[in-house]
Image (tube, rainbow, N blue to C red):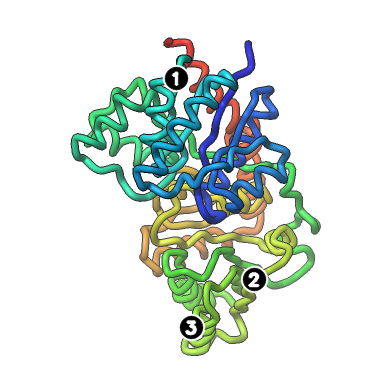
Amino acid sequence: MKPLNIIEVVNVRWWNACAHYGVLLSEGLQKLGHKVYVAGDPDSRPIRMAKEKGLDIIDKYTFSKNNPTNMLRITRGIRKFIEEKNIDLINLHRGQAAIAFSVAARTAHRNCKIVRTWGDQRKPKKNLFARLQNSRFTDYIITTTRKMEDYFLEYISIDPAMISTIHGGIDESIFVETNDKNVNRGEEVIKIGMLGRFSPVKGHFNLIEAFKKVASNRNDVKLYIAGKAIRDEKKDQLLHYVDHLGLNDRVEILGYIEDKIQFMSSLDLCVVPSVDSETISRVLFEFMAMGKPVVGYRLNAIAEIIEENFNGYLAETGNTDDLADKILLAIGDKNELTRMGNNSRFLIDNKYSLLKFAKDTEDIYLKIIERG
């Protein structure tokens, strides 16, 4: 197989799950022998991360600026780049500059394919322009949840042969236990934890409320919450809520942690209580790569990646009683915790590893190019 020349467009201004997905995919495709260029805004976090991973970058343009003059400049520049570097395929991970890249690919003196990876929770518009953009000017669509794939099929009238779901993956080599893998490592307390920025969509308050029920049923559990606070008052709100519920001796709000591997290693059960977003769930993959059983809400990618009673449990989104019940079910048997944790790592190694992620995407790329 001849190596492909690929542009992965990761024009995200911050380091979120979508940016991680695009840069990680680029790394994996390069490991498979392809030539990959990562395009993004100058000095953006994805571009810096791509550089650190030894990937070639395109940072000459501000892709997130949609004014006509900038789009015309991008179109001309990318068309020239396609022709000079013999680019076979462009994968757009965001909608900004999609038209510029599509026009560049369609007008270049080379058959360059356009893929759109839809990792955003916002659904595509149903108007005529959106339909044309997602069909005529796009050769294939990759969604990060089957739920979004179903939406495209029902409302955007996408040909089923030009869309599929790839949830993403993780560089599993980074995530290795730093402690003994025995469930409690000789301790009496069962450690439950979550890791996520202090934002309403991440469900911190839901988890704390659910934990009140857990703590009233079990004396041997503690909850640890780690994550970066956008503003100090966010952390203060959580501390006040813990105090209000009388859980000061059972819940620790750690805030930002330097070593998340060590933090995740210390936990016996991990919870992803997000109530919105999670069309890509990076933290879920990280917990699973650490060999941890997981409980989460039945939401987007979480609902599609956690396999009930295999590596964890799912609760109805926003239902704190159900979340508490699923946590209690998970910690009811220490041997089951170990079994489900081992199964989490099994799923990572066999379905969501870095190279499996890249290979699944490579298969789609090759299929599109073989169509001509």
Question: Residue at (51%, 80%) from the top-left corner?
Answer: 238
Residue 20 is situated, as x and y percent measured from the top left of the image, at 57, 47
Identify the disc placed on residue 237. Answer: 3
Question: Residue at (39%, 52%) from the top-left corner?
Answer: 299
Q: Are marks 2 and 3 in contact (CB under 8 Å)?
A: no
Q: Which residue, as the protein is rendered here, is positioned at the far left?
A: 128
Identify the disc placed on residue 256. Answer: 2
Closer to the camera in the image, 320 or 98: 98
* Local secondary structure at mark 1: loop
Instruction: Establish if 64 lies above or below 103.
Output: below
C-alpha span from label 1 to label 2: 47 Å
Instruction: Establish if 303 lies above or below 252.
Output: above
Instruction: Give the mark nearer the N terminus: 2 vs 3.
Output: 3
- Crowding around mark 3 (Cα neighbors within 10 Å: few <14, some 14 to 19, many 20+) is few
On the question of residue 78 being in view, the answer is yes
- Crowding around mark 2 (Cα neighbors within 10 Å: few <14, some 14 to 19, many 20+) is some
Image quadrant of residue 268? bottom right
Identify the disc placed on residue 108. Answer: 1
Instruction: Give the mark nearer the N terminus: 1 vs 2.
Output: 1
Closer to the camera in the image, 344 or 234: 234
Look at label 3 and name its amino acid: Gln
Look at label 2 and name its amino acid: Tyr
* Local secondary structure at mark 3: helix
* Local secondary structure at mark 2: loop
Residue 265 is situated, as x and y percent measured from the top left of the image, at 72, 59
- Crowding around mark 1 (Cα neighbors within 10 Å: few <14, some 14 to 19, many 20+) is some
Nearer to us: label 1 or label 2: 1
Q: Are marks 1 and 2 in contact (CB under 8 Å)?
A: no
C-alpha span from label 1 to label 3: 54 Å
Instruction: Establish if 14 lies above or below 98.
Output: below
Image quadrant of residue 194? bottom right
